[in-house]
Every structure is written in C-alpha cells, then in structure tokens.
Image (spheres, grey):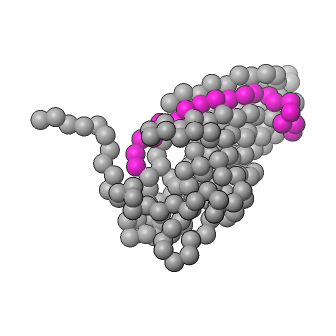
Amino acid sequence: MKTSSRLVNPVPHAAIKIAPLAARGATAMAVPMAGDGEFIFDPARMFRAMERHGHSAMMGFRFVAHGHDWVELRLPWRADLVGDAETGTIANGAVTALMDMAGGMCVWTRLGLFRPQATLDLRIDYLRAAKPGADIIGRVECYRVAREIAFVRGLAHDGDAGDAVAHMAATFMFTGPPMPPRGSSANPVGGPPGMSA
C-alpha cells in the first residue's frame, strides 16, 4: 500500500475566502468582511497574543507596523540579550531570531491567512555591530509566494534604516493547508488569534 506524507486539507482551499489585498489596506486592523464570511489575517492582533507566550515573549519582540506584504518588529535592548559585554550590543543570534519571526509573519500577512510553515533557509549578512544599548528593528517583506514556498527579504537596523545592521533573505516552506478563521464552522473552537471570522 502506497502512503503519502502530504497533509490532507480538511477544508477545501476554495472554501476559504480571502479579502483582496486592496481591501486590507496598509495598516488596517482585521475586521470581518461584510456579510459573506470573508476574513483577513491581522498581524497586529496575532502578535498581541504571541508577545505574551513562548519564544516571542521570552525574546521580548514587539509589533511595530505592517503593510500588505511586509511586517516590522522591534527587539528591545536587554542586558541578557547582549552578545559582547564590552560593547553592549545585542547578540547576532537574537537578531536572527527577530528576522525569522518577522519573515514568518510577513508571509501570513501577504497570504491574508494563517498557514503552517517552517523556515527552510535563512541567510543573514551582518554589515556592522549594532549601537550599544540600541533596540533592533527588523523589517521583512514577502516578495513571492509559490505553491509550497514563500520568499522573503529584509533588513535589521538600530534606528536608521539607511544604515542597516544586517540584511536577510529566507524561504519558508508550507507544512499544511491554510487554517480557517476562529469561530467559523470549520474551526468553531478557535485557531490562531490573528484571524477573524
């Protein structure tokens, strides 16, 4: 008997309605679409839940802004995140974690829905050390989505986007079908908090 490792989608993709990009606006908060059950993914709302739990809470990530295909997060400076005690700059690993999180969020933002994914490849080119005691801002855009892979690029800076601390490029592989919105008939108990029915 032949088996497949491909996940089966319990809800047909066609049954999940997504608001057009133009309807989402550059900074619009997620609200249910009028009447027909359409929804949009709201990265700000989802991040409010994420920053209280797990890795995002431990790292201290904060949501800054988003557009239809980009997300900007902030990593506040903390002594326990310092990589070099002499300079007081945030460790490179913390910057990588910030960029990975922003990359995943911008994929969901571009899709307009939550879809499980894993980081397939992530490259960071560090251009210089961050300023001592400075927060790091990570801005990442999703510039292409293929059938099973999303492509992102971004930069990290410490206050001046024109003088980046690091550049980043990454790919994310989808590991499952899109999830229906919380409270919908296909997900009555709930799912990721960034989706409204």
Q: Residue at x 77, y 40 (%)?
A: 137
Q: Position of residue 62 (x, y in %)?
A: 72, 49
Give the percent coordinates (x, y) of residue 170. 59, 31
Which corner quadrant holds the N terminus? top left
What residue is rendered at 44% in x and 56% in y?
179
**Is residue 79 at all visible to an observer of this figure?**
no
Q: Quadrant of residue 4?
A: top left
Q: Which residues are magenta?
A: 158-177
Q: Any magenta on residue 162? A: yes
Residue in view at x 87 percent, y 37 percent: 160
Q: Is residue 7 left or right of residue 109?
A: left
Q: Is residue 11 left or right of residue 162?
A: left
Where 121 falls versus 6 (above or below)? above
Vertical position of residue 119 compared to residue 58: above or below: above
Q: Position of residue 27 (x, y in %)?
A: 72, 59
As drawn, the residue found furthest toward the left would be: 1
Taking 100 as reference, is 42 above or below it?
below
Residue toward you, 170 or 45 = 170
Where is residue 46 drawn, in percent x and y? 60, 57
The residue closer to the viewer here, 128 or 169, is 169
- Residue at the spot 35% in from the left edge and 58% down from the top edge: 11
